[in-house]
Image: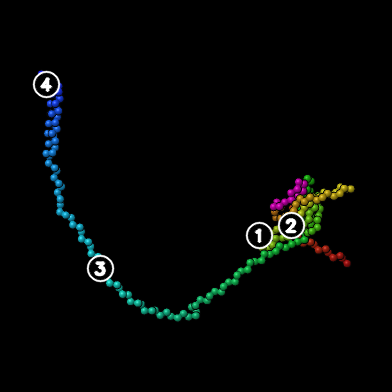
Amino acid sequence: MRPGLTLKAIFRRGAWLAAVVGAAGASLVSAQPAPPPPPQGPPVEAPPKAAAPEEAPPVVVPTPAPIAVPPISEKEVAAVPPTPAEAKPAVPVRRARYDVAVIEALDKVTAESLRFEAAVGRPIRYKSLVFTVKACERSAPDEPIDDSIAYLTVDSQPRPAPGRPALAPRQTFKGWMYASSPGLHPLEHPVYDAWLITCRAAVPASAPAR
């Protein structure tokens, strides 16, 4: 530091130098020339519009002359088929009914079996069982299986002991039995078993010999 300069004078000189440098820089920036504008070519003309095609004149089509059709003979005309008559439903063939049912019974305890005949409407006893056949019939010819079917009831009624009243019967079975399928609707009893064998007509009684 030179003698005679105060600190305040030094600060004033520094500020003045900064101002001079800033002004010089600004003048340099403003003195640069602006970039030239891009070159412009000749103006582009729009393509001319295509002219609309001229419409062709309508074509006149002449009307064809009618064609003569030869007459149709009676032989060429097909006869109308007659309307078939409505088929009537076939009447089902009724089953043939018989008045005797052939039944086979089995004692499961003694393995004893017995085949007997039971007339329709007449009760018949086998040990403690009473069989009553209500109907017995054979399958019709138009049925697929040749079978015998019987409707019957089976009551359990033990024989009364001497000097004692008879016990009331207890129904054990009621319904249809099928000879071809004994297990379809079987008799359910702890001691006895029974099934249908066939249905047949009663044998007429022979006339007494003279």
Corner quadrant of residue 83: bottom right
Q: On the image, numbered disc 1 is attached to which residue?
A: 144
Identity of the amino acid at label 3? Glu
Measure the C-alpha gap from mark 3 to mark 4. 103 Å
Give neighbour class at mark 4: few <14, some 14-19, many 20+ (Cα, 10 Å): few
Q: Name the residue nearer the viewer: 65 or 133.
A: 65
Nearest to N terminus: mark 2 or mark 4: 4
- Where in the figure is residue 179, as x and y percent of width and height? 72, 55
Give neighbour class at mark 1: few <14, some 14-19, many 20+ (Cα, 10 Å): few
Measure the C-alpha gap from mark 2 to mark 4. 153 Å
Q: Is residue 92 magenta?
A: no
Residue 99 drawn above or below residue 158: below
* Residue plotted at (73% across, 54% down): 175
The residue at the far top in this view is 3
Nearest to N terminus: mark 4 or mark 1: 4
Q: The magenta stretch spans which residues?
A: 183-194
The residue at the far right in this view is 163
Measure the C-alpha gap from mark 2 to mark 1. 18 Å
Identity of the amino acid at label 4? Leu
Residue 180 shown left or right of residue 30 in the figure:
right
* Residue plotted at (13% across, 38% down): 30
Measure the C-alpha gap from mark 3 to mark 1. 87 Å
Q: On the image, numbered disc 4 is attached to which residue?
A: 5
Mark number, residue 1: none
Mark number, residue 150: 2
Q: On the image, numbered disc 3 is attached to which residue?
A: 54
Identity of the amino acid at label 1? Pro
Residue 82 drawn above or below residue 4: below
Identity of the amino acid at label 2? Ala
Mark 3 or mark 4, whichever is nearer to me: 4
Q: Are marks 2 and 1 in contact (CB under 8 Å)?
A: no
Residue 69 shown left or right of residue 110 in the figure:
left
